[in-house]
Amino acid sequence: MIFFELFITFMKIGVFTFGSGYAMLALAEVEVVEVNSWLSIEEFTDAVALAEVTPGPIMVNLATFVGTKIGGVAGAIIATLGLIIPPMTALIIVTKLYLDFKDNQLIDKIFKGLRPAVIGLIITVIINLGRSTFVDVKSVVITVSVVISISLGLHPILAVVGGGVAGLMIF
């Protein structure tokens, strides 16, 4: 039964989320932490951090992590398939129809409305993850330092490594 729940949960995340993997995090947090209680908010935050620094799309990595924790290797495969099947199907359909509708004003208006909605989802995730991450002044200093460093042109990989080194030194 847990495999069915994993598949349906991650399929729901894949079906009902538009935009990037970061936009999917809002629904993933609700489903994984609140609805199914598979992870605490702290574990979810750690899983997001791990999914971000490992190669591959963040949501695929997160689905694999949650699936592994809940159902081992089979759980990882099932959660990941649940996540990727709906968007892959939609992508194939949209790609086939794109040439017919690319100049349609109605479709253009829909996408103009989706863009700010996706940004809203991403900001929601930032706020929710921030609540469990900003536990003290040190964590806020690391965050602000990374934002400033990346804004000034530091490569994101170096920023992540720097954050890990800072964590080793000050925590």
Image (spheres, rainbow, N blue to C red):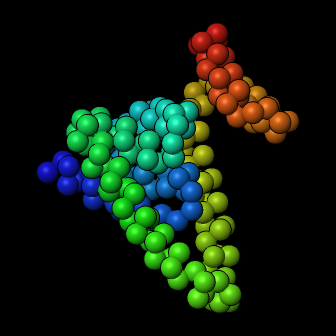
What residue is drawn where x is 65% and y is 28%? Answer: 160
Task: State whether residue 56 is above or below residue 54.
Answer: below
**Residue shown at the point (27%, 49%) measured from the top left:** 78
Q: Position of residue 84 (x, y in %)?
A: 39, 57
Picture coordinates of residue 95, whole percent (x, y) = 53, 75
Q: Is residue 115 left or right of residue 92?
A: right
Query: In the image, is 115 to the left or to the right of 33?
Result: right
Q: Residue at x 30, y 36 (%)?
A: 68
Image quadrant holding the C terminus, namely: top right
Residue closest to the far top: 169
Q: Nearer the viewer, residue 115 or 137?
A: 115
Relative image position of residue 167 (x, y in whole percent): 61, 17
Q: Residue furthest right?
A: 152
| Residue furthest left as drawn | 1
Q: Is residue 25 visible?
A: yes
- Viewed as shown, does residue 28 lie left or right of 165? left
From the viewer's perspective, is residue 88 above or below residue 140?
below
Query: Which of these two is toward me, 157 or 122?
Result: 157
Residue 48 against residue 84 in the figure, above or below: above
Task: Please state which of residues 108 and 170 is positioned toward the viewer in this rendering.
Answer: 108
Residue under the image location 14 percent in, 51 percent down: 1
**Residue 131 visible in the current orientation:** no
The x and y percentages for residue 28 are 42, 51
